Image: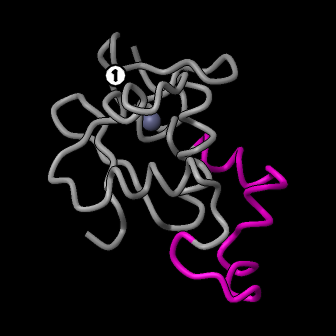
Amino acid sequence: MRCSHCNQEVPGDDAYVHRGETLCEDCYLEAIQRLRVCDPWAVYIATSNREALGLKGTDGLSALQKSIYEFIKCKAKITLEEVMDNFKLSPREMETQFAVLRHCELIRAYKENGKTYLKTFEC
Ligand SMILES: [Zn+2]
């Protein structure tokens, strides 16, 4: 199987189907991030607006987003699945929360040995 975006070989169980395309994880994460830029809440909370509003760090986030941030903060290793389990989030809810946190440059995802890990930008 090949990623239809970057044409990289993707093992079957690592492939993501997004809007009818088969994507590798990197391209998938990029795709959902691009998608959410059009989300009114994500735009509202975007870095430029946040700065204009005098918001820093987790200011202006929902209680859930703050909890997710605190949960991930400074953990040595935490997978996307562990965060979803802990907060009882569906993949779709997790995607939305992650998109806002990523957009605010609080949390990012990286991949290691086939698993997706989350970490904060500052740790
Ligand atoms: Zn790709």
Classify residue 97 as left or right of residue 3: right
Q: Position of residue 47 (x, y in %)?
A: 65, 76
Q: Where is residue 24 in the image (x, y as percent from the top left)?
A: 42, 30
Label 1: how many Cα within 10 Å (few below 14, some 14–19, many 20+): some
Dividing the picture into quarters, in which one does residue 108 lie? bottom left
Q: In which quarter of the image is the N terminus?
A: top left
Does the beta carbon at disc 1 come under 8 Å from ligand 1?
yes
Q: How many marks?
A: 1
Q: Position of residue 88 (x, y in %)?
A: 47, 25
Dividing the picture into quarters, in which one does residue 119 lie? bottom left
- Could you say which is closer to the camera, residue 13 or residue 47? 47
Secondary structure of residue under mark 1: loop
Q: In this view, does 92 lie above or below 49?
A: above
Q: In which quarter of the image is ligand 1?
A: top left
Give the residues in magenta. Answer: 31-58
Q: Does the magenta stretch include residue 1?
A: no
Q: Is residue 56 magenta?
A: yes
Q: Which residue is most to the front? A: 63
Q: In this view, does 15 lie above or below 56?
A: above
Classify residue 57 as left or right of residue 44: left
Q: In which quarter of the image is the C terminus?
A: bottom left
Identify which residue is drawn at 36% across, 68% down: 121
Mark 1 is on which residue type? Val
Q: Would you name the residue on which mark 1 appears?
A: 10
- What secondary structure do most residues of the magenta stretch adopt? helix
Q: Where is residue 53 in the image (x, y as percent from the top left)?
A: 76, 85
Identify which residue is drawn at 57% across, 82% down: 56
Q: Which residue is most to the right? A: 40
Identify which residue is drawn at 17% across, 46% down: 77
